[in-house]
Image (cartoon, grey):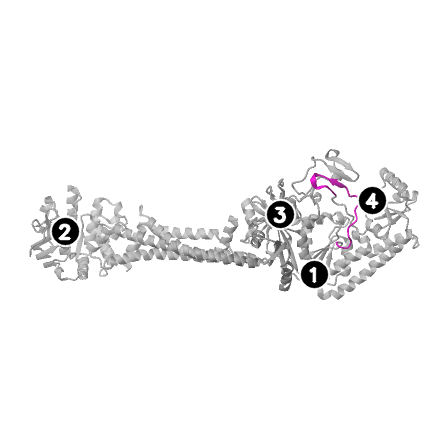
Amino acid sequence: MISLRDVRFTYGKGGFSLHIPELFVASGVRAAAIGPSGSGKTTLLNLISGIERPASGEVSTAGARVDQLSPSARRSFRITNIGFVFQQLLLVDYLDVLGNVLYPYRLHSDLRVDATVRSRARRLAEELGLGNLLGRLPSELSQGERQRVAIARALVTEPPVVLADEPTGNLDPAAKHKALDLLFEQCDARSTTLLMVTHDHHLLDRFSQVVDLDGWGSPEPMTP
Amino acid sequence: MKDSLYLAWRYLRHHEVKTLLLVLSLTVFLALPLVMRSMSRAMQQSFLARAEGTPLLLGQKGSSLDLVIEALYFQRKDVEPVKKADVDAIQSTGLGMAIPLRTGLRTQGFPLVGTSLAYFDLRKLRIEKGRGLALIGECILGSEVAEVLELGPGDALLTSPSTLFDLAGVYPLKLDVVGVLEPTQGPDDAAVFVDLKTAWVAEGLGHGHEDLARADADLVLRRQGDTVTANAKLVQYNEITESNRESFHFHGDAASYPVSAVIVVPHDEKSATLLRGRFVDAPTLQIVRPAQVVDSLNAQIFRFERVLQIVVWTVGLATAVMFVLVMALSWKLRAEELRTMTRLGSSRWKALQIMTSEVALMVGASALLAGLVGVLMARYGEPWVQTLILRSS
Amino acid sequence: MKGRPNLLSSGRVLLSLTALAIVACARKAPPDVERGADREEPFTVYTVSYPLSYFAERVAPGGVQVVFPVPEGIDPAFWMPSADAIQQFQAADLILLNGAGYARWTGYATLPEERVVVTADGCRESFLRSEDDVRHQHGPEGTHAHSGRAFTTWLDFRLAVCQASRIRDAFVQQMPDRKQSISERFEALERDLLDLDGRLCEVSKAAAGQRLLASHPVYQYLADAYGLSIESLHLEPEQELSQDDVRTLDALLEQHPAKWMLWEGAPLPSTQSALAARGVNVIVFSPAGQKPAEGDFLRVMRENVRGLECATRLTKCP
């Protein structure tokens, strides 16, 4: 579940500012956040995931008041409760497929790679058709294969929420839909709440909820 | 920490060329002082061991260092020779044994050393193949010479034409190889040994020719009483064989023949003191203790080593700075990776941990390699340095 | 793994190559060996002539082994030993050379000088020349001779005493604790040699003005020491006289009329007859350079001297 109430955020002094009066995505829902460039889509994801803290307002993600957590608590919360799929995918070039899938487990002491986790990672990879590619480096994969690795990485910690920042931005239409099919399939299977940021209106039909960010963002500081 | 080490290891593996270069440069930085120290110590010990094995050295007055280098390492220093009579004089004192050395000639790029049988006992040189010297015209090869020239007992070797002692030149003399010495990791490995008389023949002081008492008339220029003058047709031998060996002879008084240096082995300390005392005021001769000469040389090497160490440490510092710079630039290029880590929720110090792990792994590998080099130098440094000195001389 | 750089194995290769490079340049430490093992063998003395061998045996104390390795029937002066034989000399504790060019092989052999004693060196101001000497000249060195020296030095018995004294000195230097024994033994030999010398001095007086022939030029020191007038030919005792030999003999007798001829060994009866026909009697005077078939050096020399005493009528001839 994702909930934001009267959330205000500004970058630095006099930078971009965002005001979200209200936003609610129920658990297990596939939601899309749409808006033009500069409308604050990435900032929204950062606020939901706790990367950024709002100046005011409430942010609840997966039942936790993220706005009230300390920075280390936010990190800890994020690594275990949020899965990310980035537009540039941002795979680690020196880790193979399995290593990339398990990557989140390497980044925080709250998570530990053990036999169960490895087994889950392998299973997830196989479900995404990566079973024979576990030893390959990202440079040896096709774009679609890399996409699937990114999806697997986002889901390996079994997060309740997956945030996707324009993950299909670089793909052709056919590939986009294929990628979305995979993402939706995996999220639906796990009842994972999915919030995907996009500027592509053609995809909106596939989401059960659409949030329009147009007008929430402003290049000028907001007056309280 | 285990995960940081894992990520660091995977990164280093992926960028193996960069990692290898950094590890090697660090290894050089760490090992260079060790190697230098080891080589310096090996050189000093090598010089000293050789010198301590040579109790006293008699030669013409002049540079004692040149005398020592020529006599101990057979490197041509053009020292003025003494006479065979000086060798006999030392021997007749009864205070010690005199071992003559005639150096300065070369054969196929290696020094030709004329000496006596006592030299082999002094240096504990043993025959590995063949036998020792028995007749003039024979030679024994050091192990290095035999290996490089691929010669052994039964083969022949030509001396190099020399203008060292005779401006008109000396014809090459063919020597019979009768033996090869066991390796000693010393200068003797790279030398060819002959009897002193053979060395004199090789430098043109002795020769053999047809018997003029029974020579054909066309070789005789003039006969006067019991004196025969030969013409230029007379053949002088450039090879000593069984059939002509008896014809080889020396002109003049053998006591005046040249000897480059004389190794003197006193019977005891008192004899050594007496011998040194005899030459303190000698106008043309000097008697030196090679160990003393080499000690002062080692002192110079030590001073030079200290200067070198400063240079090495400066270079090392520059290497360390370069290393840090490379690492910093590397992490700058990995800014996106850092941002990804942060976005995914990595712990605050994770990046630092990974960086530290990378450095630790590389430094660890370098330290291991440098340690290995140090151990090997400690174990094999001295013979390796001696080989280096031999090959470079 | 397809195409993935394997740093682990590269690292192993690096380590191995580094180790190999260093080890390949390295060598094992030099062996710590001695060139001659300690021996419990007797003190060995090698000599180049029988007379030296005899002197050494007379002077040496017990526990000394004197070796005279020249094979029977070979003239030691011209013996050419093999490399093996020379190496046996090299291994001796003491090597006795005669000097004066005796045993020419010693001039081109490698011997340990510190263990060599040239017994005749210093016993005379200079050595006598041999009639075989041919002076010659080639190149710029001027005239010179090669062999040139007479070498049967022991036939001058005072010179022989000097040679024996050098042997004594060499033994004393090696075995100072046995000096007395060595000296006593030397003195006994000295007495024997001086006895011979004394007898030859009497011969010299009796032979004043008499001329002698010799079958070979080997009696130079005998002639010089004892004032004997000896002219030499080149005749072998075991060979018949040739026509040339007879002509040379007759020519020599004309210039150097002699009634006695010294031979190294008993000549053939035909030779003796030929000599007798010319009024020349034979005296066998063996230089004893080689070991005699019977007796020893002293016995041979005593017989030699008796022969001369007979010729000079100092004793009755047998």
Name which residue type carries label 2: Thr
How many angstroms separate mark 2 from mark 3 (CA)?
A: 90 Å
Q: Nearer the viewer, residue B356 or A135?
A: B356
User: Which label sits in the foreground, 2 or 1?
Assistant: 2
Marks 2 and 4 sit apart, C-alpha to C-alpha, by: 129 Å
Taking C166 as reference, is C11 left or right? left
Which of these two is toward me, C40 or B184? B184
In the structure shown, which secondary structural element does the residue marked by tag 3 occupy? strand
Q: Work out whether residue C184 or residue B161 is closer to the camera in this orientation and state it.
A: B161
Q: Which residue is mark 4?
A: C236
Query: Which chain hosts label 1?
Result: C
Residue type of the residue flagged with mark 3: Cys
Q: Please say if B253 is above or below B287.
A: above
x%, y% of residue B358?
Answer: 31, 55
Determine if marks 2 and 3 fall on one subunit: no
> Which residue, given by chain and number where applicable, does mark 2 sit on?
A42
Q: Which residue is mark 3?
A: B139
Which x, y percent locates residue A88? 20, 47
Q: Earlier in the sequence, mark 1 or mark 4?
A: 1
Residue drawn at 54 percent across, 47 percent down? B147
Please check the rendered image and state whether residue C50 is part of the magenta-colored stretch, yes or no: no
Disc 1: which residue = C42
Mark in front: 3 vs 1: 3
Please tell me if label 2 and label 1 are on a single chain.
no
Start and end of the magenta stretch? Answer: C121-144
For the N terminus of chain A, the quadrant is: bottom left
Chain hosting mark 4: C
Mark 2 vs mark 4: in front: 2
Residue A65: quarter of image: bottom left
**Label drawn at residue B172:** none
